[in-house]
Amino acid sequence: MYVNADKLISHAHLFTMTGDGVGYVADGAVAVRGDRIAATGPTSDLAARYKAAETIDATGCAVLPGLIDAHMHTPLALVRGVAQDVAHWMQRALAPYSRHITPEAALAGTQLNILEALKAGTTTMVDYTRPLPGWAEAFQQAGVRARLTPTINAMPPGGMAGWKLGDLYPLDPAAGQASIDTAVAFARDWHGASGGRITAMLGPQAPDMLPRDQLLQVKRIACREGWMIHMHVAQGDREIDQMLKRYGRRTPAFLDSLGLLDEELLAVHLTEATDDEAALIARRGAHMALCSGSIGIIDGIVPPSRAFRDAGGLVALGSDQASGNNCNNIFNEMKLTALFNKIQHRDPAVMPAWEVLRMATVEGARAIGLGDETGSLEVGKQADLILVDLGVPNLSPVLDAPVRNIVPNLVYAASGHEVKTVMVAGQVLMRDRQVHTLDEDAILDEAQIQAGAIARRVVADPVHRGMALLAAMEAGQL
Amino acid sequence: MYVNADKLISHAHLFTMTGDGVGYVADGAVAVRGDRIAATGPTSDLAARYKAAETIDATGCAVLPGLIDAHMHTPLALVRGVAQDVAHWMQRALAPYSRHITPEAALAGTQLNILEALKAGTTTMVDYTRPLPGWAEAFQQAGVRARLTPTINAMPPGGMAGWKLGDLYPLDPAAGQASIDTAVAFARDWHGASGGRITAMLGPQAPDMLPRDQLLQVKRIACREGWMIHMHVAQGDREIDQMLKRYGRRTPAFLDSLGLLDEELLAVHLTEATDDEAALIARRGAHMALCSGSIGIIDGIVPPSRAFRDAGGLVALGSDQASGNNCNNIFNEMKLTALFNKIQHRDPAVMPAWEVLRMATVEGARAIGLGDETGSLEVGKQADLILVDLGVPNLSPVLDAPVRNIVPNLVYAASGHEVKTVMVAGQVLMRDRQVHTLDEDAILDEAQIQAGAIARRVVADPVHRGMALLAAMEAGQL
């Protein structure tokens, strides 16, 4: 008596990420019906029970939950590599470019970033940007899972003329309100779209970029609607300075006083948070998005994720922005997170491979509020999974006993190019490195065209003369 | 009037790595005659002067010197991923495996490692291991450039029974002499083989593993023969402890007193060297092999390469050993070197992309004594070069002005899989990811077979019960 299934993935080194570890099953299989997982277990067991319309042979592959990228700025894929190796990266490297990114260019960046991340095994993308035409549709078309966060701020729309470093930002409540209204309208339109594959969060850009009343307003709306809040928190010394001047408190204490530190908050970066502040945020139930690569490159800082986890908090990994990371790849973030923490604590046993793999999968899914839907391979969850080819030189050989080497090699030796097949909600989006839902050449061509146009606008804009990397160009270092 | 050439690589984003920066040439070309570079320059110029038997179109590619890996232990590729995330990695993770690596298994590891490194754009491999049958032939057959270093030590061949942590090592001069004789015989046989593609160095395994007299003997032989010395230096607290107990000095001062710190020394790791000690070694003219990934994973330490360079020393990058790195990939080492140093100094401007690219090419070649032969693309040097496909999502788009983004993206976003074509000494070893000189499937199969056999021997050996990772296996974390 067979049970029908749409797909049976068989003969895998299966990592379900259930339980407290990695949930390994030797010669494992996953049965998929519709968009959900119908069963997991040994291949011999599932093959005897399920009659599948299609069998995907995963011999020689690791099968894992699709990876979670908890914080991206996809439009910035278009200015990949313009804002690293400098102090004041945002002002002296990125800003001369970002002011010239048109909505068409931003969309080309989003499409490029989705393609890049999907090919590296990311199945859930939490994007954080000013809403732009076609934004949600790009994720919808790609077939990936997305948590879209239109950013909200009250910065003067006309710019910051007259503002001097050290002054309080001239917040504009009307701009803030318009920004809230736009974000709420977007979230109403898209939250739950595509059978729940597309959802929304509300995204105050930072606690110093919105008046207190409007932060509270966002929180009230989010509570009422059941949406999470996704916000940069303690992301730089400039933010802390603004908070001290405006409220007399550093960011974590301020957010705590407002009641914003709860399990509906995804707090991003914590670059400037102390270990104690990180622990406070964790104890209140909020979650952390850790962007190791980005913060390492642009700030030279290791955020306090260890203290956050030690206090019981959930940490997800994020790739942030390609202008200064310079890639959006969760394999990269797993490796850097493990290594940076070992170095910071001068201890090779800190953050072993399995812990960062959990951050990239089951722990990350919980942190972004999708713990019931994705992040592990178990019955009833969405069928979001990847096949990673272990039969490549950098992941060979496969050892099983007395110690299994697959998880350490996935974290320390894989780059994401070994991802062979990607499934989201039961649909195969990439097979043998060929993406079925996107036109890869067209996306690369459009990205190059739009990026070239941005560069020409930057060259024509005198602001670019203050760019830090011009000295490196002149010295022949780029 | 055309001049004949064997190959003309055209229309590249050409990085010659000549001068003080990266030596960029827009729409650049390289003419190759025999094993050497006949010309470099704009494509329009070279195409008008050279008539080539074959033209390689590098449109959309970066062309760079082949990368230099200054320190590898290739046999350990076979135990990839068994010795990370633990304290005392060598004793409690690697040793139970390494004692069961037969010569056949070691050779399978060497072949796997050569394949892995070649596919990631490494053209010069500096290997450091006990000599084994077929070792040099493996590099010869692959067609890569190699600097082979048979290791020399005076450790008792029968093992260290009775030795207790904290005791001096029981050095055995007869074993040391046999080890020297074997290494010298190997170097005589192979130094200069394959038209100079294969050369040798002498490799005392560490200053605490050979009596002082024999260290001096190695130095005398190396001087006489014109060979460099390649040695682990200040590689761990155990070494420093041995040196203090035996000689009353830490390693750098001891080597200085012996006259070993000169430009003929490639000093590997410097894990435990202070900034002052690193500066001393650099001032004496010795060179440093920096293994960022390996030392980060196994020790949680960032070696003092910045102090070494600030003192005027040359630093090369090394991938060390796959048992605990877990890959042999110089793109990985470039990225980690830049990032670890930014973090250590909490300064994003430290070790910009162009500096680490120089360490992986022109500076690395000088550090290993091949500065006249490889490491940059200039007339008369060996034609060792790689084509890197920039038309992939993670390296797109290409921006040129006002700042060029290629070098930062090669360092921070590339993984080595983007390397399309590899040439060594004018011969194409890999084209469009297909390696011509090696049977990839046969190498992967043999590595798996030999590794499986090692694992079975480890399981049968009671020593494995002391392995640190057994606890992780039991807890379902691997």
Image (cartoon, coloured by chain):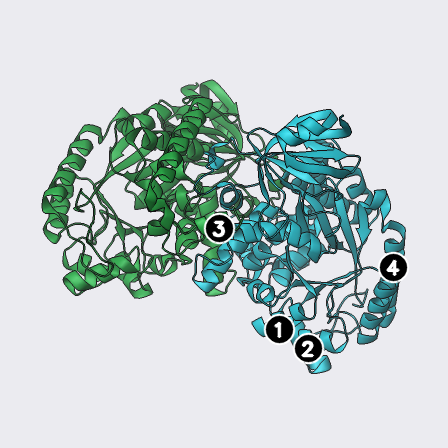
Chain colours: A cyan, B green
Kindly identify which numbered label has been placed on residue A253: 2
Image side of residue A375 versus residue B78, left or right: right
| Marks 2 & 1, CB-CB < 8 Å contact | yes
Q: Which residue is drawn at 15% across and 59% down?
A: B257
The first of marks 2 and 1 along the sequence is 2
Label 3 is placed on what type of residue?
Answer: Ala
Q: Determine whether label 4 and label 2 are within 8 Å by CB.
A: no
Vertically, is A240 above or below B200? below
Q: Residues within 10 Å of mark 2 (few under 14, many from 20)?
A: some
Instruction: Report, in whole angstroms, how far the alpha carbon at label 2 lies from the one at label 1.
Output: 8 Å
- Mark 2–mark 3 contact, CB under 8 Å? no
Q: Distance of mark 4 from mark 2, alpha carbons?
A: 27 Å
Res B241 quadrant in image: bottom left
- Tell me the amino acid under the disc marked 1: Glu
Q: Which residue occupies the foreground of this view, B268 or B402?
A: B268
Q: How many marks?
A: 4
Q: What element carries label 4?
A: helix
Residue shown at 22% from the left, 31% from the top: B191
Dot 4 corresponds to which residue? A184
**Residue B206 rendering spot, x and y as whole percentages:** 23, 50
* Residue A277, label in figure: 1
